[in-house]
Amino acid sequence: MSRNAWIWLGVAAAALLVIIIVAVSGGDDETTETTEAAETTTTVAETTEAPEETTEAPEETTEAPEETTTTAAAAEPIRIAIVAPSASNDLAFTQSIVDAVNVIESERDIAEVAITDGTFVVEDAAAAIRDYATNGFDLVIAHGSQYGGSLQEIAPDFPETSFAWGTAADTFGLPNVFAYEAASDEGGYVMGVMGAALTESSTIGIVGPIEVGDAKLYVDGYKAGAEAADSGVTVNVNYTGSFSDVALASEAAQAHVAAGADVMTGTAQMVVGAVGVANDQGILWFGTQANQTSLAPDIVVASQVYKWEVVLREILDNMESGTLGGSTYKIDLANEGLVIEYNPDFELSDDVKALADQAIADIISGSIVPTG
Amino acid sequence: MSDFFTEAVLIATVAGAIRLAVPLLLASLGETFGQRSGVLNLGVDGIMLLGAFAGYYTVLKTDNVWYGLLAGIAVGIGLGLASSLISVTLQAEQGISGIGVYLFGLGMSDLLFQRLVGTPVPITKFPKVDIPGLSDIPWLGRMFFQHSVVVYLAFLAVPLAMFIINRTTFGMNIRAVGENPEAADSLGVSVAAVRYATVTIGGTMAGVAGAALAIDLGIFQQNLTNAQGFIAIALVYFGAWRPLGVMAGALLYGFVNSLVLQFKTLGIIPQSWSDIAAMAPAVITILALVIVARRFRAPAALTKPFTRGT
């Protein structure tokens, strides 16, 4: 190869590298929001680079609070950072925490909210978590069970910073780590009761990702609810083996259709593929993690929505009184951290709604334990 | 097991296999052109992702699936030309430069999606076309002849690719350049021009594959292809660089996937085994690859840049 060719190759490779860095950092670390929307333009550009370019980040991000705290009260408003695996608006897991922090932001004096989303690579998430802690954020939310190992290493290095980790039930015995989880089996059970009442073919299909954690809890709860309500109902469960394979989720839904299902549900971000099939075939759908009505307004009956703000309020109260971690929280039907939101455009009979209300009351009173 | 041998389930298994095979088939047919001429493009998945986003976004804005397909083609041509520039003109190491294209597509497609769309919004899907006469055949009609229009196009591309590679002057040049670029060059064939053409064909097909996937699902999401582009590259080896072999590989992969999904749904594979069963398509494809690949030889000049007089 000639000398010229090597030079050109070098130039091209450098250019490509720059493009890739810009693209990946922009793609992964999508939004940064502050309390003052008008001031965010510069903040977005600066803080979103933080996880990728660790060495430069401190100088850049420290500018953010100067701009945003100008309008803040003197009561030391806190700064919250979120690190989450999928997109902020995925209508599922990541959106649930982003929505919750937005609610908190409207209730309390929050100086800044920074979000790094799309970090499905755990190492990227770990870099972002460490970066936010380094930059003096008061509360860093590691929103993914898979981030636990990283948090266990990082949290002891920042004793002044509070970390929240979910969905999980373990704080590693660290004084500055809170853990939070969702009793997603409870809402699953309630919607399973409705599903059993609505199915005419007596067959229900569930599309799951991998049989772990929150997803397993929801699927088990839904199945238990449907079978408890009507023992003649067959509930087929299909774990596709992936949180992200939309095409496979779509085909899993097709398999449920072939097996005779006329009511379906599913959990994790890849279910958008299954919702599409349900919509084409006129099959009823129950959503979870976020309100999925917008994906298919004709067939979504109801969604179990996570209100993490219930947990966040307690965490922030603790922080104000000087406790930076050590406790575990759970959102459930009783504390209204789990809410069943109905699709207003779907005509659900009062009888079915009454069944759901009864199931909710029974779970809150403890007379029903969904997956006990 | 008796649940499986019902009309609805058997038809769904075969029809599902075909649907799952289509994006792989399109992408790997395109990659076959590049590899037959001696260029390995590992960036297929990145091109598919950008093609998928372009297709999705165009349909979202225009509500016309054909414009979406055209957008996928346009993105494929652009990235195909860029890939040619990197591998042919700049002679970059093909095993590495393609990874760069992949990462670019992965990041850029998500960035654009987040900036321009945000929350996933369903779009119009490709129309289903029942082939007159054939679609009414019991069982077979619903398995093979009641699909969306891209399914037929993808399978029509197989004989077309065979014809181009085996029966045309252009195809002869592709094979010559892939086997012995020095000899081809001495006979007046422009190695660079042939490789630019084949890599661009590969990029175009990858763009179409991505757009077809997004428009068939009616949705876009981060990393929509879930590494199908890499499976497509493996299928080119599986198919021994021949369009028919590639088609067989894509159908096998689709069929195993579809079968596993049906078995899981019906409880034939117990729930506790489902995560292991999810690996079956990849494992079976790799095993088949090991067995098949031993019998066939790769194009002699594959991954080797050509410089005249060296």
Image (cartoon, helix red, strand yellow):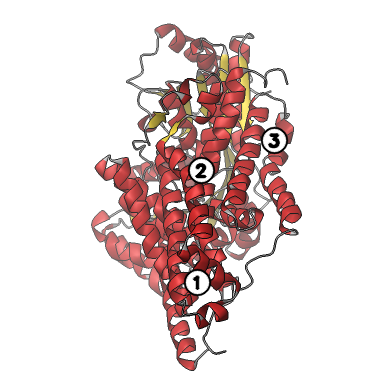
Label 1, residues with CA under 10 Å away: few <14, some 14-19, many ≥20: some
Residue A130 position, x and y percent, is: 54, 64
- Quick check: B7 left or right of B147? right
- Label 2 sits on residue: B22
- Residue that numbered label 3 is attached to: B274
Q: Tell me which amino acid carries mark 1.
A: Thr
How many residues crowd around disc 2 within 10 Å: few (fewer than 14), some, or many (20 or more)?
Answer: many
Q: Give, as a three-letter code, the residue at label 2.
A: Val
Please tell me in which quadrant of the rendered image residue A370 appears.
top right
The image shows a total of numbered marks equal to 3
Amino acid of disc 3: Ser
Which chain's residue wears label 1? A
Q: Nearer the viewer, mark 1 or mark 2?
A: 2
Q: Which residue sits at x=62%, y=50%?
A: B245
- Residue A54: mark in rendering: 1
Horizontal side of A43 relative to B2 (left or right) equals left
Mark 3 Cα-neighbour bin, 10 Å: few <14, some 14–19, many ≥20: many
Is B251 or A159 nearer to us in this picture?
B251
As measured in the structure, the alpha-carbon distance from the residue carrying label 1 to the one carrying label 2 is 42 Å
Which of the chains bears the disc numbered 2? B
Secondary structure of the residue carrying tag 1 is loop
Front one among A198 and B204: B204
Q: Report how far apart the C-alphas of labels 2 and 3 lie in the structure.
A: 24 Å
| A269 sits to left or right of B72 | right
Are the residues flagged by discs 1 and 2 from a single subunit?
A: no
